[in-house]
Structure formats: C-alpha cells, structure tokens
Image (spheres, rainbow, N blue to C red):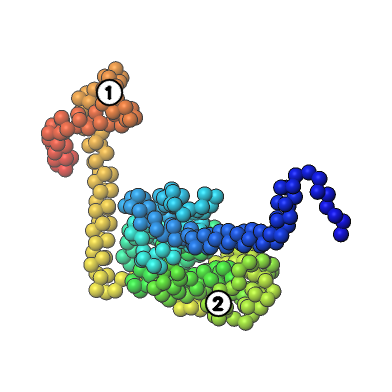
C-alpha cells in the first residue's frame, strides 16, 4: 500500500482517518433514518381513508332536498346537491359530480336505503293517448299522479316503445276499435309508466306491450311487469305482444347485426327461448318491428297478437250503471237539441236587435275607444288592446245590466207570442 502524503493540515488528516473508520456506521444510520421517514410517511397516508363521492353526496343530500323546494326534478336536486358536495372538506378538487351518475345511480341507491324522496318527480317522457276523448296526457311523475281514468271509456292500455308508431296506430283507429289507450314513449318505460300500469291493474285493465325483437325489447316487457332497484315492490301482469325472434323468422324479416357492451341480464336470459338466445346472444342479430312492411301489416300483426292473447271486447257499462248513464247522456243531448232549435227559431234575431239597441251605450266611436284603452294601459301595461277593451265592455255591461235583462225578457215574451 502506498504511503499517504503527510504534507499539509495534520488535523484534517486525523479527521479523515477517523471518518474512514466510522463511515460504514454513519451510512447504516442514514439508511435507517430514511427508512423510518418513508415508513412514517406511508403510515400517515394509509391512516387517512379516502371518502367516496357517494358517501359525500349522501351526507349532503338531506340539506339539498330542503334547498330544492316542495316539488323538484332530479336535475333540480342535482344542482342543489353539487355545490354542497364541492364544498365538502373531503371532496377532491379535480373531481366532478356527473348528472347521469347522480340521477341514475346515486338517487336510486339513496332511495333504496331511505325510501322515496318526497317531492321528487321525473320529467315527462312520452304520452298517454285516450280513445274517444281525444285527450293526451304527458307521462311524467306529477301528471300520472294527478291522472284520473275516465269512467267506462277504455279498459286496456298498450305500451309502445317507439313514439313514432302512434301516428300509424292513430290512422288505423286502433285505440278506438279496441277501447284501448296507447302509451307511446322512447325506449324503456319510466317510473311514471309503471306507476300508471300498477294503478290500471287495480282497476281491472288489460295491459299490453309492443316492442322490437332485441334484448332491450324483451327487457322492456320484463321491466314493465317486474320489480327493479327503483321500484322494488312493483308487480303487474303485462301481456307481451311484441315482435319475437320466432315471429320475425316466420315472416322472413331481415336481421340486423348489433354490438352490446353489457351482458344480457340474468332474469331475462332465463325466460327467453333457445332460438332468441341463439340470435341475440350468440349471433348478435336483432329484428326491428319497423321491418314489418307495409305499416298496415304491422297493424294486422298487433291485432292478431291481441286476439291470440285474449283481448276483451268493446266497453259497455254494467246494467246497474247503464240506465243511470244513459239518462245523463239523454239530458245532455236533449239540452243541445233545444239550444239549437231556440237559436235557429229566434235567438240570432233577438241578439241582433238587442246589440243594436244598446250599441250607443257602449260608446264605440274610435276616439272614445282609444281613450278607454289608454286609461286601462295606465293601470296595467301588460294588457293587450283587446283585453283592455273587453275589460271596459265588462264594466259597461255591469252598469247597464238591469236594463239589458229587462229588454231581453220583453223580447223573449214578444217572440214567444208571435
């Protein structure tokens, strides 16, 4: 070993010699300190559990419901919840609360735990078309909750998954010919449709569904009648007259390829036929009801399915109510006939004579009319000139009411004597 040069600082040389001896011990000490720091750092973060979005939303949802008001939509509740969630101490700044996740997942699970949220309603999706009355009701939570079934108007409801089918059914007068209301929407039935079906079954209505021959179509028929997470106690007897794979093959319809990311729901997999599983699961081919052409053949298909599934006949009230209702209808019709006869015999002449007689009292010259309208505008600028003028006429009518009544009485007596 070469000798070291001892020229220079003797203290430095002694220090180097000592450090050379203790250097391995120093290194081991530093390594142990670093390990301890790393260990304590890992322990610090591991001991502070991460709070999920769901837990945060659930913790603030009670306050959000109070902020949303008496009646609110899922989107209203979302906007009431979001700021409360974002200001929560455990919310991660770079995270967003997405509406789809909030409305379809979190609200469903929250209500599973705590029961239905009072005041929450879903936006209308689709319409209920009544036969004979010409009435159309939007299918929304509030609308269906307030809906009253018309007495002895229809005793069947058909749910059609495609809203575009309604004009074809309307043209064929299917609803009127079968005394059957038609609920048309886009895709899966919302809770309001299922609530409508539940109420209808309690009133002894026949319930039908018409859909495509695909996984969603079969699932729509199942969901209409069976429970789901959102409606765990729902159970209704629904008659499926939708397009089946077997019928599509028999009619020689062309299949359409499709790609589905999710697996077929297990409850549905158990109930569909082997042929349907082959096409929908193994071959990934589906059949659309729109392929039944022309559309008159589609109507015939629906009618054939209705008859095969025991559709009831036309609605006639039971004898115990028929006599009473027929008497009411007679009075309504008789009143209308008499009104028409009176009008034809002398009412039109009478109205013309009285209008001329009182015309001067209503001051119809343009300057006076304009002045009256402008005075009304001073009190309410939201009025149109027509509304302002009608208000003025109503005041004059009240002012001359006694004279007008007396003139009417005299002219009626005179007309009857003639």
**Would residue 378 appear left or right of 265 to someone viewing this image?**
left
Which residue was labeled with disc 1? 378
**Near-viewer residue (36 or 16):** 16
Which residue was labeled with disc 2? 266
Q: Earlier in the sequence, mark 2 or mark 1?
A: 2
Q: Residues within 10 Å of mark 1 (few under 14, many from 20)?
A: few
**Would residue 134 appear left or right of 19 to someone viewing this image?**
left
Q: Who's the residue at 22% across and 26% down the image?
A: 362
Q: Position of residue 204 (x, y in %)?
A: 35, 74
**Near-viewer residue (365 or 182):** 182
- The residues bearing labels 2 and 1 have C-alpha atoms spaced at a distance of 70 Å
* Res 402 → quadrant: top left
**Near-viewer residue (334 or 165):** 165
Number of the label disc, if any, that sits on residue 175: none
Q: Position of residue 22 (x, y in %)?
A: 68, 59
Q: Quadrant of the C terminus?
A: top left
Q: Nearer the viewer, mark 2 or mark 1?
A: 2
Q: Who's the residue at 24% across and 28% down the image?
A: 392
Mark 1: secondary structure:
helix
Up/down of 10 relative to 46, above or below: above
Q: Quadrant of the N terminus?
A: bottom right
> How many numbered badges does the structure rendering display?
2
Q: Who's the residue at 44% across and 61% down the image?
A: 55
Q: Position of residue 321 (x, y in %)?
A: 25, 70
| Res. 301 visible in picture | no
**Would residue 78 appear left or right of 12 to someone viewing this image?**
left
């Amino acid at each position: 070993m070469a000798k070291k040069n001892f020229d220079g600082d003797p203290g430095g040389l002694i220090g180097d010699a000592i450090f050379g001896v203790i250097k391995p011990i120093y290194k081991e000490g530093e390594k142990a300190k670093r390990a301890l720091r790393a260990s304590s750092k890992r322990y610090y973060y591991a001991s502070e559990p991460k709070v999920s979005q769901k837990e945060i939303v659930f913790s603030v949802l009670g306050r959000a419901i109070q902020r949303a008001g008496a009646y609110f939509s899922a989107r209203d509740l979302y906007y009431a919840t979001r700021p409360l969630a974002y200001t929560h101490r455990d919310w991660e700044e770079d995270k967003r609360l997405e509406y789809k996740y909030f409305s379809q997942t979190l609200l469903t699970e929250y209500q599973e735990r705590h029961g239905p949220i009072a005041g929450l309603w879903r936006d209308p999706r689709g319409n209920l078309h009544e036969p004979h009355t010409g009435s159309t009701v939007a299918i929304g939570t509030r609308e269906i909750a307030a809906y009253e079934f018309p007495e002895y108007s229809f005793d069947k409801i058909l749910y059609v998954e495609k809203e575009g089918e309604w004009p074809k059914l309307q043209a064929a007068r299917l609803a009127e010919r079968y005394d059957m209301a038609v609920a048309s929407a886009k895709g899966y039935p919302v809770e309001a449709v299922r609530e409508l079906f539940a109420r209808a079954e309690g009133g002894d209505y026949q319930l039908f569904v018409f859909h495509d021959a695909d996984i969603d179509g079969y699932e729509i028929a199942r969901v209409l009648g069976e429970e789901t997470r959102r409606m765990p106690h729902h159970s209704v007897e629904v008659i499926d007259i939708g397009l089946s794979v077997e019928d599509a093959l028999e009619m020689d319809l062309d299949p359409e390829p499709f790609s589905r990311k999710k697996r077929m729901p297990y409850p549905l997999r158990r109930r569909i036929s082997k042929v349907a599983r082959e096409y929908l699961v193994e071959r990934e081919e589906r059949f659309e009801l729109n392929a039944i052409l022309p559309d008159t053949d589609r109507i015939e298909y629906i009618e054939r399915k209705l008859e095969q599934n025991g559709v009831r006949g036309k609605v006639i009230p039971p004898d115990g109510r028929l006599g009473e209702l027929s008497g009411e209808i007679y009075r309504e019709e008789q009143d209308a006939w008499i009104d028409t006869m009176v009008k034809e015999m002398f009412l039109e002449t009478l109205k013309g004579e009285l209008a001329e007689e009182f015309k001067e009292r209503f001051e119809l010259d343009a300057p006076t009319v304009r002045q009256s309208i402008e005075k009304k505008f001073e009190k309410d600028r939201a009025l149109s000139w027509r509304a302002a003028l009608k208000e003025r006429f109503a005041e004059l009518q009240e002012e001359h009411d006694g004279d007008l009544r007396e003139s009417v009485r005299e002219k009626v007596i005179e007309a009857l004597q003639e």
